[in-house]
Amino acid sequence: MILVIFFSLSSSLINLPVALSHRPHDVVDQVELSSNYDDNKTVFIVVRGNLFKSEDGGKTWQRLWEGLDNIDNLVTLSVSANNDNVIFTSSLYSGIYKSEDGGQSWLKANEGLNIKNTKIDLLEISPNSDNFVLAADSEKGIYKSEDRGQSWSQIFQNDEQTKITKIAFIKDQPETILMADSVGNIRISNNEGESWETLLTLNNNSKITALQVSPNFITDKTIWVGTEKNGVYIIADGKIKEELKSKKVADKFIRDIAFSTNYDTDSTLFISTWNNGVFRSRDGGKSWTNFKKGLTKSEQADEKQFNAPHFDEIRLSNNFEQDNTLFLAGFDGIFKSTDEGETWQNLNSLSSRIVIGLDVSPNYENDSTIAVIDYVGQAHISYDQGQSWSAMRAGLELPNFTKSLRVPTDDPRRFFDIAFSPNYAEDQILFLGLLRDYILKSSDQGKNWKIINLPNVPKSFVRGTFLAISPKISEDNTVYVATNAGTLYKSVDKGENFSILTELKKRITSLIISPNFASDKTLYAATFEGIYKSEDEGVSWQLITQAESSQDLVWWGLAISPNYQEDQTLIAGSSNGAFKTTDAGKSWIKINGLPYDNNNQVTEVAISPNYKNDETFMVTLLGEGTFKTVDGGQTFSLIDDEQIYLSRINTVPSASIPIQFSPSYGTDNTIYGFGSAEPEIYKSTDSGNSWKVIPISSSDKSLVDYINYIPFIIYADRVHLFKLLVALLIAVISYLILGYIKLNKKRRLNHLVIRLGATFLIFIISIILMY
């Protein structure tokens, strides 16, 4: 029993918990492979609504953004089977996008579609011609393009009771199209969609979730159909040839069907299911084997708010017969197999280590310090301008938040904002905002952290805390924290304690404080509904964008001039472009020097600390890139580097501005930024003309980290330790009592042995009784 306790404590210390989960998980909705995957190892995925590309088989990822100005999530993806430079994707509210350079740049392709009333959620490129593309609004109908997306026309309109779920082409039969719906209908067109007839209706009217044409269709006339709850049907010549019973495929909740590229000789095909991963058949579907090794599931998928499949699309390498490679999309990420699906590896698609926050020390000229926060669980600091990094761990250990050694489903260490104290050179204070109802504070340059709870959190609390620190914190000790839902907290003791100051009851997107706060008492908050201003330290607020807000704008961000006392200047980013005020918000003028075209979404704004002299600020125009002006916004130049896109990743919440000027920018010309799909940041030392990538290295845990973990282990095993101490105490008392028992002096050695033996026996009995 003692050994059990010892090994329990030891293993807890050795196997320190790590962040494994966050909400929602890294859901991969779509996966597509290049038609030349064996040569270029290119994979495309839609993860949490973002489009990523890998050119090394999924080891690393790049974010595809140029031309993608969608605010909502991407929902579908199709890559040409003949030319992998041709790709289509879409979002429900922005419509269809087309790329002809492998996803590096995109153009809208909505001619002929009424985007306000049409939500494209299915796209398929014909394997017979890149020019022939189908798009579907599952609730309204199907549209076709015969000119590679330049124009669209509707070819099918469905009724209100059904939803289109799948579209399929038949290779070498360009006129033929198949369509399936939510009530078990399979329709066919033999004239490129000009007319349709019902091929078959499943008896149970089951929703069809997979529709694949046999590679040997010309000879076997076979279609494979997967359903939501009733398994797989094999259809030949318009009739059900076979229904795969549960004894063959145990999971009837089918998500996808995929054939080997060499099916006519190897008879191999795969089925993915909602819960049980992948089934493989090597005999054309006569027998099946379920493979799960390496596949992971998240219980989040089963929660009511998600109710999502654990596993989804399957895609095979074009050289599958040689490389045995296939990919599987899932709620828990993207999986890869290189042994025909027998074992799987979870690829790091949306890394928990991507940077979502960055700040530069106000004393950067002397201390060269920058700090970053990751998506989940980690924060790093550099004292040499990013050349090397130290993990800030003490106080950020998972049990410090959960009070348990168990790894939770939802890791609470979801960072949201990071800020140095303006008096950092003296007080060494940093703050971290989280997606929770507390913040973190360090008073020793990030070496140790403590949790600061926010009191009386309203039931309407929406995750996310914004930080605004008084420029004169050394004198007034003032720190503000705003929640995403509009509750404003204030501290007058440098963030040790907070109280609710006011309720804006607006969705906040940015909170800034005047550089001259000590005298003007001014704060600004950008919200979904407008920009608000307070001139009494946050007690009362007034809407200052009445005219602009009448345009139904969303305000994404704010930047304030460091010379605000004299120039009264702010820059704001909105859904209708960038705006500027030079009278402290009384009036706003749209900045027209940006290449808006049909896209006006300015999501990021940052202003030079030397604005009085250089009139420099930077903005990011969604899907167009990051721009810089050196004349107060009259003209702009684009950062001409396709790698550099200084913008927060969609659906990865953050309050931190991804463009950060060095406080000594006037002399060092240094700018930092983030926005990559990898754990790295960007740095420019020539005012943004050229950039280099700085990886955020993950240092190994040191002896100090393990020592810091001991209190958590003691706390977690406190009951066992208490029982052990009680048993030891009983044994010690027993030993003392046994010492008073008189035995023959000639048998002194026997007396000692008896005494020790009896004590040990009492100790063991005590342990047994307590456990």
Image: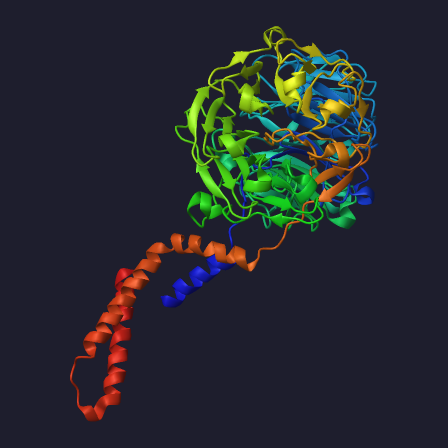
Furthest-left residue in view? 742
As rendered, which of 107 and 540 lies closer to the eye?
Answer: 540
- Determine the image quadrant of residue 84: top right
Q: Tell me which colouring the rendered structure shows.
A: rainbow
- Determine the image quadrant of residue 190: top right
The percent position of residue 566, horizontal first and vertical second, equals 66, 18
As rendered, which of 710 and 660 lies closer to the eye?
Answer: 660
Q: Is residue 48 left or right of residue 632?
A: left
The percent position of residue 213, horizontal first and vertical second, equals 72, 31
As rendered, which of 675 and 171 lies closer to the eye?
Answer: 675
Q: Is residue 103 left or right of residue 606?
A: right
Which residue appears at 67% of the width and 22% of the height? 563
* Quadrant of the rendering where the C terminus is positioned: bottom left
Which residue appears at 81% of the width and 42% of the height? 40
| Picture layout, residue 405 above or below residue 438 | below
- Determine the image quadrant of residue 750: bottom left
The percent position of residue 285, horizontal first and vertical second, equals 65, 42
Is residue 439 something one can see in this rendering?
yes
* Quadrant of the rendering where the N terminus is positioned: bottom left
The percent position of residue 684, horizontal first and vertical second, equals 77, 36
| Picture layout, residue 689 above or below residue 294 | above
Is residue 623 something one can see in this rendering?
no
Q: How many marks?
A: 0
